[in-house]
Image (tube, helix red, strand yellow):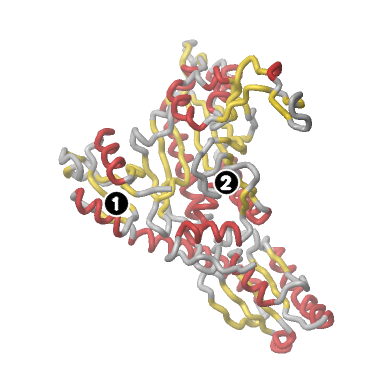
Amino acid sequence: MSKAITPREQDYSQWYIDIVLKAGLADYSAVKGCMVIKPYGYALWENMRDALDKMFKETGHVNAYFPLFVPKSLFEAEEKNAEGFAKECAVVTHYRLKTDPNNKGKLMVDPDAKLEEELVVRPTSEAIIWNTYKGWIQSYRDLPILVNQWANVVRWEMRTRLFLRTAEFLWQEGHTAHATKQEALEETVKMLHVYGEFAENFMAMPVIKGVKSANERFAGAEDTYCIEAMMQDGKALQAGTSHFLGQNFAKAFNVTYLDKNNKQEFVWATSWGVSTRLIGALIMTHSDNEGLVLPPKLAPIQVVIVPIAKNEEQLAAVRARMQPLMDELKAKNIRLKFDDADNRTPGWKFAEYEMKGVPVRIAVGPRDLENNTVELARRDERTKEVKSMDGLAAGIEQLLVEIQENLYKRSIQLRETMITPVDTYEDFKKVLSEKGGFISAHWDGTSETEEAIKTETKATIRCIPLDQVAEDGLCIYSGKPSKGRVLFAMAY
């Protein structure tokens, strides 16, 4: 099978799919709209998961697990949440199949096995979790509850794209309960910053932190905070959200606590989550026409050693010489692979690991052993140089740091060129069609104006930046007064 991928400039959407498939991240499945995450893609997700899980636990959170199925009556309890997800819900109505008496060998739903109450396959877990919290919380001594779960969810999407939008996907969802509004607000913002730190320090992906407009906020939330990233094609991607739920779910499920003054109060809530969509973001932030480019902190394989050998004797000599280096790298917790498979040529392996985005590749053969050197290639810049074996482990460790920093620097430089201030609707539409990216513009704060712009251009308000500068101006659409600029963009 050819490893060539469609150039970005020719067809960005196909370029993306080619990378997902040919880098071995995921595959299509027999279930329409769902994907198979292949071992290499799952290893990438595990590295993301492990890093985030550590950050969650460092901020006092613990993991739990809640059921996949939500009774329909519970799901309906918070009306805005139910209405917001209703069109995406998969529903279980029966619990058994039986052989079709009119068509032997075929199965049919057993009409006698209808559930007393239909079950929604979780699109999000607020309903089942808050119904559970009702039994966990009696007094202020039971608060706060800081729980996260790693799970799968189902949102029945009609138009899907691997990792970015599938009917089933993996994610984490934090659900916390607090005694006061202030505590819940602080939690919401804290987790937004955790997501921002992860995106920038691990994914090397710059993000803008902000608040969603009322039209774009999570169904059932009083405020939704988000991190927004810009992809290479000029479209934005919502990479994570943190929601201040107020007392909406506490009131829907009658979750109260006895405060220090022996007064019953409703609990304050938050929820927050990121998903396997981050893998799509990673691909579109860093990759090129040769394939995947991965930041070292998340790469399943950080360093690959490809021996050049014509026979077993030469291979054994290379392996013996490389073993001390491999031991040093492993001692530094560097994820390493020594590819001595004899069914592929070195050239094929070079192309394969370039496609898979391995940050550092080392080639070494008999002549290198004589010269005490290796050929070292770095994936981010696609450069090669000859390096002495002396002190090589320390040099590789530092190189991985440099590659991580370079990917972030390169991405933020691109992002900065893709933020354009405009002051008129005509300029807004021109920039949107010719350049894309984030458009910084005045907005009058009304849902009507926001919806009109979306209807006419398909651009949405990605966020109101947390660092928004107070600036009097006029809305680009209505001409009404505005107190500051917001960021619009086309989005995934």
Where residue 316 appears, x then y in whole percent? 82, 78
Q: Quadrant of residue 167?
A: top right
Q: Amino acid at mark 1?
A: Ile
Q: Nearer the viewer, residue 180 or 248?
A: 248
Q: Is residue 466 visible?
A: no
Q: Is residue 114 left or right of residue 160?
A: right
Q: Is residue 352 above or below residue 264?
A: below
Q: Is residue 376 left or right of residue 426?
A: right
Where residue 26 appears, x then y in whole percent? 62, 53
State the residue lying farthest toward the right.
313
Q: Nearer the viewer, mark 2 or mark 1?
A: 1
Residue at 36 percent across and 38 percent down: it is 212
Crowd rating for badge 2 (residues with CA inside 10 Å; few <14, some 14–19, many 20+): many
Please give the residue where the numbered disc 1 appears in the rendered image: 439
Please give the residue where the numbered disc 2 appears in the rendered image: 52
Q: Earlier in the sequence, mark 2 or mark 1?
A: 2
Residue at 78 percent across and 73 percent down: it is 342
Q: Nearer the viewer, residue 33 or 318?
A: 33
State the residue lying farthest toward the front.
102
Q: Amino acid at mark 2?
A: Leu
Label 2: element kind: helix
Q: Is residue 188 above or below residue 102?
A: below
Where residue 57 appears, x then y in whole percent? 59, 40
> What label sits on residue 240 in the rendered view?
none
Q: Is residue 408 above or below residue 399?
A: above
Q: Is residue 117 visible?
A: yes
- From the image, which quarter does the N terminus lie in? bottom right
The Cα–Cα distance between marks 2 and 1, rounded to whole angstroms, is: 30 Å
Residue at 21 percent across and 54 percent down: it is 427
